[in-house]
Image (cartoon, helix red, strand yellow):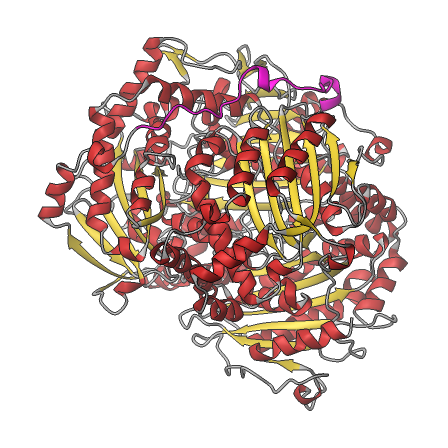
């Protein structure tokens, strides 16, 4: 598997195991909280952690956004061929829902854009064929490079600024200064001196902001609803002042150090940061890559004081040295015209000073990135054996690729040989390296890609996620890797491999769709730092960018092959040049395993990682230099990909007029629902199928999605069933991988999910080969279920081990994740979510025989529901459903056998002013010294008006909550608020994680803030303020879907829930128009103060650490809770729960529904 995610982000080599385990654990809790965009903390509520790799160090924020407890989203856009944007983000979380960001962006126009870069120079910007937005690029008089994009079809605007300076430029005496500087720019400017005023402005306009510090760049960005030009102008003006007149006040400087410390504390038990620091320690210690990038209170305060350094002066010195317009790139995407955007850009960013700063890397251009005798941790020919926090088990081989005459930075940017090498080494089809390792029982997964990318070098890595057996065969695993590399260098890579990789990349380019504006502007500003103006969009998204040695690619037209043989050979040469550097002598090896615990003799300075270093044995190196032949191992080049769609198959059945795609929508048009799916087959309540269908009339792409769900009660009826569901999904997906891998490369996808209400199959992608693909997968799953099960107990134990380690990752969850987990558990019906301890216990006794019996019953009976949507006509849809029906051959069940739908548990009603129900649990990881507390306010109102009022409330309180508990009180780095949907109810949550205050303090301050909301935030509102919040939420709700996948997911949500309210967005928008201040006050009085029949229903969920200054008395496992909860009510009248009481509490609440 090449380590990349959509939008060109790559998965870190050290994140591979996380990815592999994610595959085993995602369905454990089928109704997980979807990730919530949070406030300035880089975390999302579903514990999805988005970290740059090499990890960037970000702060900042976002507006609250409604998320739902629901089935894992069935649909994501197929990844297709991996694109090659240089920077990567890592998605790393072992007990969360994994979501990939959208693809690049845009939608329609087949010619390059002519736009001005200099006063008299016209530049053709190459953009995707379907991108009909208007672009212009130019340079402001102060040297700031600008790229504007006008998209009248959107309500949303976004802007990003990339400052070409990162953590590598930190002074040696002040590690973390670049990151600290990034934090400080949000805390007041000359024109807008109030701290957090930007955040407050964005909150009231449906927006959010964020930033991250990377090795050599720092990126700031925001988005907002911007139909009103005056609001966009103000947003850009506020943003621009960050870079022209930040205050760096004494008070903010002192307080924000606590945020840096809390952020670092959060990362101390994160394997990504821990292992990344070890990786950096293998570079030349005189090279800035080896530095500690995050910083903490010791490096920024204690050490600077000891050295006589004034931190604030050092901050200003850093800012004035590097924050220069000539080293910045700006991108803006907005509904306004280019002329209006250009005026805004000049007014808002023209005052940024041009200090004529040189590129920071000039200062270390003569320092070799790697020097084997001068590194903190020995590099080549050595192996690092490290103890991870989570139960990771993997081996990584890393090679430094230092730019020079034989492999230049231009090779990496324009030819991208790493894409071809990653494609081959990371392939998962028949004859692949991974196929061999799996057959030997040594590996569960493999990834291959470049990783670190700096101005003077990059690294290339291969990581293998090992089985327990593989851990004892590491030398043999590495020998197989070198055997494959030797094949690549000695046996000519077939031309069809190069052409296919190019063709697949071009296919993705051809049908690139709009993504989120905030993601798009980030990718643009980073690209602008690397590529010439004509390639600002195409540069990171296309291969073979140099048509000849003297001419760059100039056409947006997709290519099916290289322009000529000379171009192909130039790319082959660059690929072989990269391969020539993947040698035994230059390899850096690392092994992660819990088996090293108690056997290490070194401790990494910054994160405390225990590790060993030893030379790779001479015998192993000799075997790797002369490995077994590919023929002996049964490895070979990938076969030609049969799933690449034909040109005929890419025909769109119902074209969408270009003007419709770009047209600015009026308010009336936004309030008009889009056409919903219709029922094309209804066998009745007692019949086999209900089939919903919609032919695409909005996106004009040759893609379709098909979702089949077989409703049945038995597949998730116990914790053991849930475990067997996990095992089945893992085994089936693994069995199908060799067949399906080429399909996924060619833009197809499938997903198998066993959920509380049945079994779901999802297929999607280019419709040309979709029917055959779906039929094959369905047949393999249902005709002989043993086909996809383990052949013997040895193989079964390999799968069981993966899931065991996935469950054990729960013990390494961040405290805030634990607080969210337990509060969500308290609201979820018993058979819809089982506890981690229940699943672990059930797994222990599960056997291969159990799995076989379970699998045979899985497809035996049920009621079929389906949605077919996209580039298929009605007859094709019916034929596909009929074909799948014949393949599955299930027995139809009666309506009284249908599985029950999710019904939220009602929290106990408490009297006005009473303390909430309280869950207190210990943080399992004794080394994690953070405390967390979350307040959840349950709203049982089911009307559209209730739903939108709670979202308005969330927008009103999020910035003051953050400002009070994080900025003013400095209680912690993670301070978030937001709304979640659970069935037809909503909850409003406020959460804090802290390394400096115990849960008692956190809970007190959260409740104190909540108690002040009416008097301090709601009563002072005027109707104009309310209208502003309503407008922001209305614009965001009525923002059109960016992709077919997002519309399909929304439609399926209505079908699966049984609500069938396909016009929900417009209903809620209509309800928004009726909201006034009194409605908001009444809502708060009803649900927080308890003045309604539904009453005050609150729960506090606390995670208590066992060590550090935030530690407090360990909570009891059980308070003696019994039916009705009376025995666990304290003297203060509070229902108090320990971790062992939650099951009885849920049972009690379920009986009262």
* 652 falls in the magenta region: yes
Region in magenta: 637-661
Magenta region, main secondary structure: loop
606 and 755: which is toward the camera: 755
575 and 1006: which is toward the camera: 575
Q: At which x and y percent is residue 171?
A: 34, 48
1140 and 750: which is toward the camera: 750
Please identify the quadrant where the C terminus is shown.
Answer: bottom right
* 565 falls in the magenta region: no
Q: At which x and y percent is residue 370?
A: 22, 41
- The image quarter in which residue 690 lies: top right
Please identify the quadrant where the N terminus is shown.
Answer: top left
Kindly identify the residue that appears in the image at 63 percent across and 43 percent down: 889
Q: Would you say 983 lies left or right of 797 here?
A: right
Judged from this view, the residue extending furthest toward the bottom is 1131
Q: Is residue 576 visible?
A: yes
- In this rendering, the answer to whether 295 lies above or below 733 is below
Kindly identify the residue that appears in the image at 28 percent across and 30 percent down: 636
Q: At which x and y percent is residue 1049?
A: 67, 41
Q: At which x and y percent is residue 73?
A: 62, 46
Q: Is residue 63 visible?
A: no
360 and 744: which is toward the camera: 744
- In this rendering, the answer to whether 409 lies above or below 901 is above
- The image quarter in which residue 166 lies: top left
- In this rendering, the answer to whether 726 lies above or below 106 is below
The total number of labels drawn is 0
């Amino acid at each position: 598997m090449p380590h990349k995610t959509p939008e060109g982000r790559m998965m870190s080599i050290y994140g591979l195991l996380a990815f592999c385990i994610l595959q085993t654990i995602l369905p454990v809790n089928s109704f997980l909280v979807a990730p919530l965009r949070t406030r300035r903390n880089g975390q999302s509520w579903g514990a999805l952690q988005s970290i740059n790799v090499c990890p960037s160090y970000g702060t900042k924020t976002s507006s609250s956004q409604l998320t739902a407890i629901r089935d894992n989203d069935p649909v994501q856009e197929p990844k297709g061929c991996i694109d090659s944007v240089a920077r990567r983000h890592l998605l790393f979380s072992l007990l969360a829902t994994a979501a990939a960001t959208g693809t690049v962006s845009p939608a329609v126009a087949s010619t390059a854009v002519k736009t001005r870069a200099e006063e008299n120079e016209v530049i053709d910007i190459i953009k995707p064929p379907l991108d009909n937005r208007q672009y212009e690029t130019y340079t402001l008089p102060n040297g700031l490079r600008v790229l504007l994009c006008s998209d009248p079809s959107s309500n949303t605007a976004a802007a990003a600024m990339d400052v070409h300076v990162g953590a590598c430029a930190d002074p040696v005496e002040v590690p973390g200064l670049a990151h600290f500087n990034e934090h400080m720019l949000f805390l007041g400017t000359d024109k807008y001196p109030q701290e957090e005023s930007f955040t407050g402005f964005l909150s009231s306009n449906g927006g959010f902001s964020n930033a991250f510090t990377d090795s050599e760049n720092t990126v700031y960005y925001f988005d907002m609803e911007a139909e009103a030009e005056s609001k966009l102008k103000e947003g850009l003006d506020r943003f621009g002042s960050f870079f022209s007149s930040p205050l760096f006040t004494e008070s903010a400087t002192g307080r924000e150090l606590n945020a840096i410390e809390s952020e670092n504390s959060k990362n101390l038990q994160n394997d990504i940061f821990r292992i990344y620091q070890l990786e950096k320690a293998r570079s030349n210690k005189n090279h800035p890559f080896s530095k500690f990038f995050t910083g903490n209170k010791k490096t920024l305060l204690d050490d600077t004081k000891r050295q006589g350094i004034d931190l604030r002066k050092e901050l200003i010195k850093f800012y004035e040295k590097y924050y220069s317009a000539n080293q910045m790139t700006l991108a803006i995407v907005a509904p306004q015209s280019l002329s209006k955007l250009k005026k805004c850009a000049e007014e808002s960013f023209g005052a940024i000073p041009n200090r004529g700063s040189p590129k920071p890397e000039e200062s270390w251009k003569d320092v070799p990135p790697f020097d084997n005798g001068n590194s903190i941790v020995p590099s080549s020919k050595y192996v690092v054996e490290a103890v991870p926090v989570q139960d990771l088990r993997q081996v990584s081989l890393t090679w430094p690729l230092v730019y020079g005459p034989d492999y230049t930075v231009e090779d990496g940017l324009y030819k991208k040989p790493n894409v071809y090498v990653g494609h081959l080494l990371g392939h998962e089809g028949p004859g692949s390296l991974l196929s061999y390792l799996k057959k030997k029982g040594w590996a569960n997964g493999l990834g291959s890609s470049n990783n670190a990318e700096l101005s003077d070098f990059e690294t290339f890595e291969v990581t293998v996620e090992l089985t327990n057996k593989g851990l004892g065969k590491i030398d043999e695993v590495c020998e197989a890797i070198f055997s494959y590399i030797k094949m690549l260098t000695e046996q000519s890579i077939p031309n069809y491999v190069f052409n296919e990789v190019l063709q697949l990349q071009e296919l993705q380019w051809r049908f690139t769709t709009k993504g989120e504006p905030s993601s798009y502007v980030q990718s643009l500003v980073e690209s602008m730092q690397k590529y010439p103006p004509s390639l600002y969009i195409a540069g990171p998204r296309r291969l073979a960018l140099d048509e000849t040695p003297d001419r760059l690619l100039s056409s947006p037209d997709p290519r099916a092959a290289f322009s000529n043989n000379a171009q192909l050979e130039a790319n082959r040469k660059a690929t072989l040049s990269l391969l020539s550097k993947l040698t035994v002598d230059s390899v850096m090896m690392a092994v992660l395993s819990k088996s090293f615990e108690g056997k290490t003799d070194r401790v990494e300075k910054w994160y405390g990682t225990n590790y060993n270093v030893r030379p790779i044995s001479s015998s192993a190196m000799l075997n790797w230099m002369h490995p077994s032949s590919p023929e002996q191992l049964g490895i070979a080049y990938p076969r030609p990909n049969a799933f690449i769609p034909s040109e005929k198959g890419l025909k769109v059945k119902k074209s969408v007029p270009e003007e419709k795609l770009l047209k600015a929508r009026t308010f009336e048009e936004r309030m008009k629902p889009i056409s919903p799916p219709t029922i094309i087959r209804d066998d009745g309540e007692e019949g086999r199928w209900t089939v919903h269908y919609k032919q695409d009339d909005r996106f004009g792409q040759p893609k379709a999605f098909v979702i089949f769900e077989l409703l049945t009660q038995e597949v998730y009826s116990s914790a053991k069933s849930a475990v067997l569901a996990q095992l089945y999904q893992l085994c089936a997906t693994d069995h199908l991988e060799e067949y399906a891998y080429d399909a996924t490369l060619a833009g197809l996808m499938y997903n198998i999910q066993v959920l509380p209400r049945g079994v779901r199959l999802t297929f999607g992608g280019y419709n040309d080969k979709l029917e055959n693909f779906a039929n094959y997968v369905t047949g393999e799953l249902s005709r002989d279920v043993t086909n996809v099960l383990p052949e013997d107990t040895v193989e079964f134990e390999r799968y069981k081990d993966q899931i065991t380690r996935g469950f054990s990752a729960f013990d390494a969850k961040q405290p805030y994740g634990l607080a969210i987990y337990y509060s969500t558990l308290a609201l979820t019906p018993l058979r819809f979510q089982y506890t981690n301890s229940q699943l672990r216990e059930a797994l222990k006794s599960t056997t291969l025989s159990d799995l076989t019996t379970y699998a045979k019953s899985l497809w035996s009976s049920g009621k079929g529901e389906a949605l077919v949507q996209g580039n298929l006509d009605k007859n094709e849809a019916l034929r596909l459903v009929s074909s799948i029906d014949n393949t599955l051959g299930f027995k139809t069940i009666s309506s009284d056998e249908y599985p029950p739908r999710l019904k939220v548990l009602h929290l106990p009603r408490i009297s006005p002013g009473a303390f909430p129900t309280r869950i207190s649990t210990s943080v399992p990881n004794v080394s994690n010294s953070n405390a967390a507390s979350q307040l959840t306010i349950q709203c049982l109102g089911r009307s559209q008006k209730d739903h939108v009022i709670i979202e308005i409330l969330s927008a009103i309180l999020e910035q003051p909550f953050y400002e009070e508990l994080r900025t003013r009180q400095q209680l912690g780095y993670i301070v978030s608020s937001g709304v979640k949907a659970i069935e037809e109810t909503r909850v409003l949550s406020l959460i804090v994680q802290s390394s400096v205050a115990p849960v008692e303090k956190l809970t007190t301050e959260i409740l104190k803030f909540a108690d002040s909301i009416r008097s301090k935030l709601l009563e002072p509102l005027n109707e104009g303020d309310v209208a502003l919040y309503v407008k922001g939420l209305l614009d965001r709700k009525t923002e059109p879907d960016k992709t077919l996948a997002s519309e399909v997911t929304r439609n399926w949500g209505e079908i699966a829930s049984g609500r069938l309210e396909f016009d929900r967005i417009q209903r809620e928008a209509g309800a928004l128009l009726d909201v006034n201040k009194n409605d908001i006050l009444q809502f708060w009085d009803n649900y927080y103060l308890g003045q309604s029949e539904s009453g005050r229903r609150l729960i506090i969920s606390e995670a208590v650490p066992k060590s550090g200054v935030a530690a407090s008395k360990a909570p009891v496992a059980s308070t003696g809770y019994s039916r009705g909860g009376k025995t666990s009510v304290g003297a203060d009248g509070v229902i108090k729960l320990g971790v062992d009481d939650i099951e009885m509490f849920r049972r009690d609440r379920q009986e009262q529904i």
